[in-house]
């Protein structure tokens, strides 16, 4: 009986120790892939990235990605796709705005490992999103 009781305490103590160790580990967040906010998507610096900008709003948008893509009009339902790499362009950005200077918002998603999808749509009020930038550490920010 004593032997059985001692082994029960030993097993219980090990399980309690294991549980405490697991609780103390930092949580690893799952990478965001759909309906992401600024800073929730991160790419590996140096990787070549495809950026898809989609106008899901009701008005034409203007956009540009200096120095690779000059100002363009993006009509409702259309997509512009471009590729960027850190070596050729540090901190690549895409700028967008409503042609009527009305506020817009950007919704981010990551449909593939090296693909960033930016859906731009009408916003009810200011402040307006104006650009997305892939920071030096790979995070995607909306500004």
Image (tube, rainbow, N blue to C red):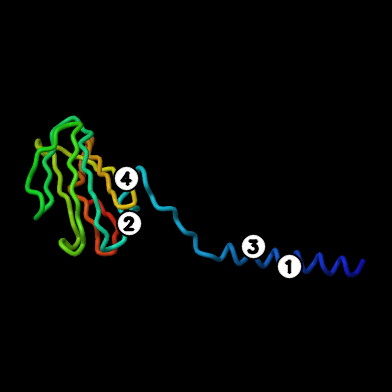
Q: Name the residue under label 2.
A: 42
**Viewer-nearest of discs 1 and 4:** 4
Label 1 or label 4, whichever comes before in sequence order:
1
Label 4 or label 3, whichever comes before in sequence order:
3
Label 4 or label 2, whichever comes before in sequence order:
2
User: In the displayed structure, does residue 129 sit left or right of residue 100?
Assistant: right
Gap in Å between the C-alphas at discs 2 and 3?
31 Å
* Label 2: how many Cα within 10 Å (few below 14, some 14–19, many 20+): many
SS for dot 4: strand
Per the rendering, the mark at residue 43 is: none
**Viewer-nearest of discs 2 and 1:** 2
Gap in Å between the C-alphas at discs 3 and 1?
10 Å
Gap in Å between the C-alphas at discs 2 and 1?
40 Å
Q: Mark 4 points at which residue?
A: 109
* Label 1: how many Cα within 10 Å (few below 14, some 14–19, many 20+): few
Gap in Å between the C-alphas at discs 4 and 2?
11 Å
Q: Mark 3 points at which residue?
A: 19
* Label 3: how many Cα within 10 Å (few below 14, some 14–19, many 20+): few
* Label 4: how many Cα within 10 Å (few below 14, some 14–19, many 20+): many
Work out whether 26 lies above or below 112.
below
SS for dot 2: loop
Q: Name the residue under label 1.
A: 13
Estimate the x, y position of residue 129 in percent, counting from the top left. Answer: 21, 46
User: In the displayed structure, does residue 12 sit left or right of residue 129?
Assistant: right
Q: Quadrant of residue 43?
A: bottom left
Estimate the x, y position of residue 79 in percent, counting from the top left. Answer: 19, 38
Residue ranking furthest to the left: 70
Quarter that holds the N terminus = bottom right
Gap in Å between the C-alphas at discs 4 and 3?
35 Å
Evaluate if marks 2 and 1 touch, with contact meaning CB atoms under 8 Å apart: no
Label 3 or label 1, whichever comes before in sequence order:
1
């Amino acid at each position: 009986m004593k032997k059985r009781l001692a082994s029960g305490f030993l097993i219980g103590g090990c399980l309690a120790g294991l549980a405490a160790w697991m609780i103390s580990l930092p949580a690893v967040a799952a990478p965001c892939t759909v309906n992401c906010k600024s800073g929730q998507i991160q790419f590996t610096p140096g990787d070549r990235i495809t950026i898809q900008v989609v106008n899901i709003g009701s008005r034409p948008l203007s956009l540009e990605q200096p120095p690779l893509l000059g100002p363009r009009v993006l009509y409702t339902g259309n997509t512009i796709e471009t590729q960027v790499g850190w070596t050729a362009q540090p901190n690549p950005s895409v700028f967008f705005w409503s042609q009527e200077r009305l506020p817009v918002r950007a919704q981010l998603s990551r449909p593939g490992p090296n693909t960033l999808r930016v859906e731009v749509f009408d916003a009810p009020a200011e402040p307006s999103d104006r650009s997305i930038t892939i920071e030096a550490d790979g995070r995607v920010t909306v500004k």
